[in-house]
Image (cartoon, coloured by chain):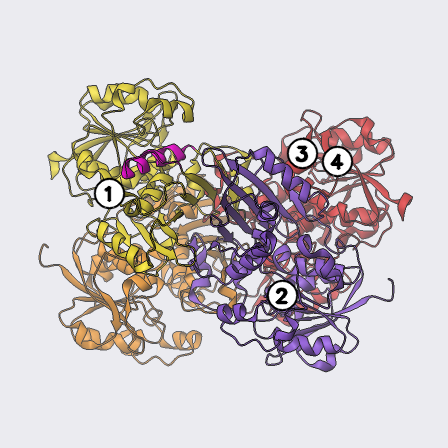
Chain colours: A red, B orange, C purple, D yellow
């Protein structure tokens, strides 16, 4: 393909999601990584220092952000803190660069929701109606045409893939939804230098956090509400698991009409039949984080507790892949008219 | 009590809960361990082979069960598989030996429930009305007078301590209860020689199991129902966390009337004010497994999600201590008129 | 190579090294996996049951070994227990199938050494002189021409890459070599259903095993001796680390003549300058297992303790990749005239 | 015992070794904890915030150091950074308070060695000849009479207990000693807020650090030299294991005269026959970290590699107990004429 390679830049390349973008894009046959950038306030850093596992695979260093380095770039991945992407994206789009933003800045249709939950003034509100929420399984056609994709939060994508077959058919009581999610620690990123993230504090521990107030709640509510066509409120509790990668979501809701496990399983199988990265397990089979670590797959399973008529939907993803960088590459493939599996079509790492 | 130490036997001393009983009772100032027993079908094993961490602390070997070894014993702890205790307990009681059974055999008031969920015929049904369900926080006075205590399941005790202040006041909708529990792997015991329990399979993994059908469900339902005075059905999902010890329970229910976090916190503080081993955290504080590993404490916390009027109650225990052997010793103390803290009044092991 | 893809069979596809072979070969652009086999005594198993992480990536099941399934196959990878490969290899070679054996059966020049350490009679001794010890960094040209490659043990390859620059130059006292290696648990494989390999027993534990008698000792001695040109005996101690993958080898030896760290570092840099998969770290830099997990790289580092004139050479590999299946694919590439990086040229998975 | 309780203060109570001192001393029947102190520059902190596992076991807060708080105190444990104890100890001794210092400040007979390796000027050199190196197994009588005990480094005590039977009999070549140690992460303490100590960076990783230059090297050399009566230099390499607690030391040396494993085992058994906290394993048995976690035991094992005439001595300790706070309490017991097992005589926590 040679000169027709798509040139991409990664902003925030030294973090964990940045590292995953580099790892995935280095093996993407249609991509040339043109620049690895950090925030303009940060110092240059050799890639092998930021990501020793990628030593020797590229000559590029991670250098401070500078617009001049983006000349000729076709797409930019923004793996930056919330509040930064809204500054960068408008300029990039003006230069004709397509943007896949992994932060929360462009996920909300409603700037007020963002401002309330993220406690920041949104400075690029005009782009909110244009940006596409990057879940290929829900918004594939819009993503294909988008200039700006807001890659979803890791918890929301796991919850959406677990519940969308039920939501879009309105099979569940809308005030009964509980999302109980369990995440590996890499979701906290690399720059959280707090005692609570030390190995000694997390190993052999299990905790909840952000109870009744995590910022991924309104993001789920926006997308759940869109699926059912009316406003929904949910209860969401995230937990930290002593492992590096993975999100396991256990979603609960009350059925409106009685159904059996095989009934709902059939709906899931139908909805996801053509989805390359959603694997509906056999009826009765349970998902495991280890089956998706390192890959872009989401494994989904659904059960009816016949004694209580509650549905229990379970999903697993690698939070850094389908929950972040892999899904971003999947969106990128769609935006550039490629088969969405390119660069992503491989198994995870197990055991 | 001096030279009148209470003589105890531990049946099933080579398993994990057996090992915890030995560890705790070796440092119990009022106890003399008279015999360490295995099932009669098993071979003798030096304690240092079964439990290298206890090497040098006692001369006793673990020997096959033989009634002759129980002469003069005051109490027996049964850390045996379900179905074995119902054979042993009647004979022990006949000899005047008090029994603390850590299996499920005597937990149910109703033999049918046991037989349905455990798929065994109950051969000592006459003892079911006498046996006391061993949660000191709920049944302290009955335990004091009991000859036979059924130590609760690890998940049920964590759920009961999380929800009892709400249940006994009927503040929640009875069909809305979801118990989402996460357990360390030691709950599976030591004899589960299956591929799924190998280190390589569980490390960096997270799974659910027993979805919509775990055997601790009817046990919770029995005790929840007793607290509210009418039959309740719940949805319970256990999960396996890549850590050795600990259970973290996140319990959800819908409030009947609006309440604030501080309202419900006050009820918890009131109910548990005099409980030595239940620590109600400060309002807004979150529990961690690491705070209870190795100790008999249960840390409890409660929140109201004001947006959905759901209550989220959280509890942590060490599944082998408050969830098994420690709670059994606490019951033992009560049965013998001792301060229930004796032998248990110490902090866990952290970090 | 297009439609002339090389057809390969994997025997022992349901184990951990088998799974890695499948994972790597599925993404190898020149390979078609023709058959996934188990031992003839084992039952057929869907790949998604043996390796849930590979679900959906191939339609093949793992079926019992049957020669008929090998028609038209160009190469066979044997990921089978020691003692099985010596039965299979002669027949495969007769059919014109090239063999890469991951067991120990063809690693020794001397059948007696094998028989003494592995306690098995060798039934294909005539192939021992022909088989090539599969370390590309030492025997690249022979591997290119081989019909039968004996893939090295995981510990020996880590020790060889750590010490070969010193051995081939005879810079160290030959009776002073100590190899202290630390391995992730996956090296034990999946079929070791013993209490000692349960999660509960290994998590938060660290052990030595096979002290003064591990079977990789004579394999190291054979190759070390070949490098220096005279018989060497070494002391080797393996240890188990509570992690799934990775080998960290710390090798010690006494220098014959004084040297500085930068002196020896220069030799390593020289020897490995053109090696695609050996990364000599900068002088003073230390290797980490996490930098190689999931990849075929070996990171190497060397220090002189100037106070004692001991050299300390450190290497890290992923035991299932460079220590097994990845290295086997590298040998395969050489045997079929391919660039040895094909299918392997990617970073590991971190964090 | 009542009013004759010994009053102790713990300085540095909010760190990991400080927390272990509190945990152990709270259950010490002859001790009353009079004060929990931090550095004078730090803020007061409730104990339950520093150590949630100790919530409810004492009313004491951790308050900034102030001499007034030490009135009436009999002994002070200093769990402070290197360089702080040399300031505090002289004043405490002047007040008649016995001091057990867990830092490195009083471990060296020779101030120059300290100043070279720790890069600090020693301001209390006059106390170096008086302070006793706190290994009860080597210096019990001196400890009994000491006012000032320097609790040993975690690695040195593990190496000393592994090798002292050989050293004091001069059975090994003095220039052949290699100490390869593997430590849990808690040895790094709680205040090391660096990326390298995050859970995500250490979990599933294994690393060496301080190669050919760790500060515990001269401490081992001082004590090894004292045992053999002439100066020794050793090679010492510490490694980080992804677990919280434990040190596993593999020590290598060349025998001067041929010996068998049972010969050396007999010497170990003899030397440690009366040591309460050193457990010599049966000949051929291998130590495990999990057997000592949470306890003050050191398990020791020794092997001869008959093929190379190297001795391989292995020891395990809990770095925070026998490697720090537990050993400090053992020394304290000796200093106050108590049975040295008091407060420490219990098994560790396993599994």
Whether residue B222 is situated above or below residue D234 in the rendered picture: below
**Disc 1 and disc 3 in contact, CB within 8 angstroms:** no
Q: Is residue D15 left or right of residue C147?
A: left
Q: Which residues are magenta?
A: D215-233
Q: CA distance from mark 1 to mark 4?
A: 56 Å
Q: Is residue A66 visible?
A: yes
Residue A82: image tag = 3
Which label lies toward us, 1 or 4? 1
Query: Where is residue B93 drawn, in percent x and y?
Result: 20, 73
Residue B295: image tag = none
Which label lies toward us, 2 or 4? 2
Residue at 52% x, 33% y: name it.
Answer: D194
**Disc 2 and disc 4 in contact, CB within 8 angstroms:** no
Residue at mark 4: A60
Nearer-N-terminus badge (4/3) = 4
Q: CA distance from mark 2 to mark 4?
A: 36 Å
């Amino acid at each position: 393909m040679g000169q027709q390679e798509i040139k991409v830049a990664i902003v925030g390349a030294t973090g964990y999601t940045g590292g995953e973008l580099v790892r995935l894009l280095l093996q993407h046959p249609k991509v040339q990584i043109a620049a690895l950038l950090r925030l303009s306030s940060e110092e240059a850093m050799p890639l092998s220092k930021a990501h020793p596992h990628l030593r020797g695979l590229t000559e590029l260093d991670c250098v401070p952000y500078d617009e001049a380095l983006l000349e000729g770039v076709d797409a930019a991945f923004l793996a930056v803190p919330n509040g930064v992407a809204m500054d960068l994206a408008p300029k990039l789009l003006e230069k004709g660069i397509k943007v896949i933003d992994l932060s929360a800045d462009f996920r909300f249709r409603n700037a007020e929701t963002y401002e309330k939950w993220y406690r920041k003034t949104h400075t690029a509100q005009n782009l909110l109606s244009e940006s596409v929420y990057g879940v290929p399984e829900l918004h594939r056609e819009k993503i294909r045409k988008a200039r700006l994709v807001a890659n979803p939060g890791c918890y929301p994508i796991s919850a959406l893939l677990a519940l969308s077959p039920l939501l879009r058919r309105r099979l569940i009581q809308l005030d009964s939804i509980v999302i109980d999610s369990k995440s590996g620690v890499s979701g906290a990123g690399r720059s959280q230098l707090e005692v609570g993230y030390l190995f000694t504090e997390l190993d052999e521990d299990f905790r909840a956090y952000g109870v009744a107030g995590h910022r991924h709640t309104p993001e789920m509510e926006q997308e759940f509400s869109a699926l059912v066509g009316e406003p929904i409120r949910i209860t969401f509790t995230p937990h930290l698991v002593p492992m590096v990668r993975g999100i396991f979501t256990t979603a609960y809701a009350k059925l409106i009409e009685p159904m059996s496990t095989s009934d709902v399983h059939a709906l899931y199988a139908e909805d996801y039949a053509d989805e390359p990265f959603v694997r509906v397990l056999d009826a009765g089979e349970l998902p495991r984080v280890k089956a998706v670590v390192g890959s872009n797959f989401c494994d989904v399973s659904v059960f009816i507790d016949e004694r209580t008529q509650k549905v229990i939907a379970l999903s697993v993803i690698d939070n850094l892949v389908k929950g972040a960088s892999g899904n971003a590459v999947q969106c990128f493939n769609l935006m550039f008219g490629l088969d969405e599996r390119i660069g992503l079509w491989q198994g995870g790492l197990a055991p």
